[in-house]
Image (tube, grey):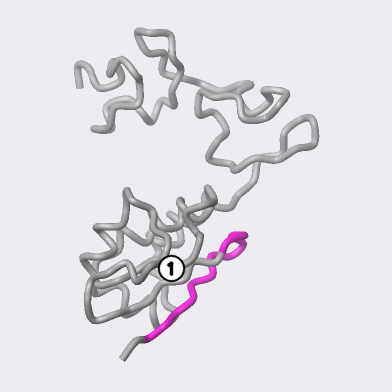
Amino acid sequence: MVRSIILSIAPLFAVLSILWIGACSDAGGASCPSHLEAIRSCERVIKGSVCDTEEGQCAVACYAKADCDEYYDIDEGRRPAWLVQCLTPCSERFACKNGDSILMRWQCDGSEDCADGSDELKCKYFVCKSGQRVSPAARCNDRTDCMDGSDEEGC
């Protein structure tokens, strides 16, 4: 029997729809390739076009971190504290000085996402050997964030 659940990530603008099925398959739905295997290992499938939005991709990445047995609690509407914490930055917005807004997680990421560049003002960065700027959290996080890999050197 197939059980369908819809997980609304308030105040997330996208709705993530996950189906619980007895076998691992993509059921013809769209998926976020980088997180698909983790979700499939729990016999879950992502359906719809959630991967077409940054908010949706962020939410899928959070749900992919769940242990398989945690999905039963999620099915019942209970969210572990770590999941709530992971989902929060998926939808928070930063107000640019020119009146636009961007996802909060894009602020101080080393790339100007506001047309006026206000999301990168007053930010502290780790400066890669190449001159690229990345978040200080990128230093020694076991993931290469600098294109030259200098953020992981000497860790």
Q: Is residue 26 magenta?
A: no
Which one is in front, 82 or 114? 114
* SS at badge 1: strand
Looking at the rendered structure, the kind of residue marked 1 is Lys
Residue 142: % across, % down:
23, 32
Point 62% across, 62% down: residue: 11
Give the quarter of the image for residue 83: bottom left
Residue placed under numbered mark 1 in the picture: 47
Q: Is residue 11 left or right of residue 131?
A: right
Q: Position of residue 53 (x, y in %)?
A: 54, 51
> Residue lying furthest bottom in this view?
1
Q: Residue furthest front?
A: 28
Q: Is residue 82 left or right of residue 55?
A: left
Looking at the rendered image, the quarter that the C terminus falls into is top left
**Residue at the spot 39% in from the left edge and 80% down from the top edge:** 75
Question: Which stretch did the figure color magenta?
Answer: 3-14
Q: Name the residue rendered at 41%, 72% in the picture.
A: 18
Relative to 145, residue 129 above or below: above
Front position in the image: 14 or 90: 14
Quadrant including the N terminus: bottom left
- Compared to 4, does 109 lie above or below? above
Q: Which of the 4 image quarters holds residue 36?
A: bottom left
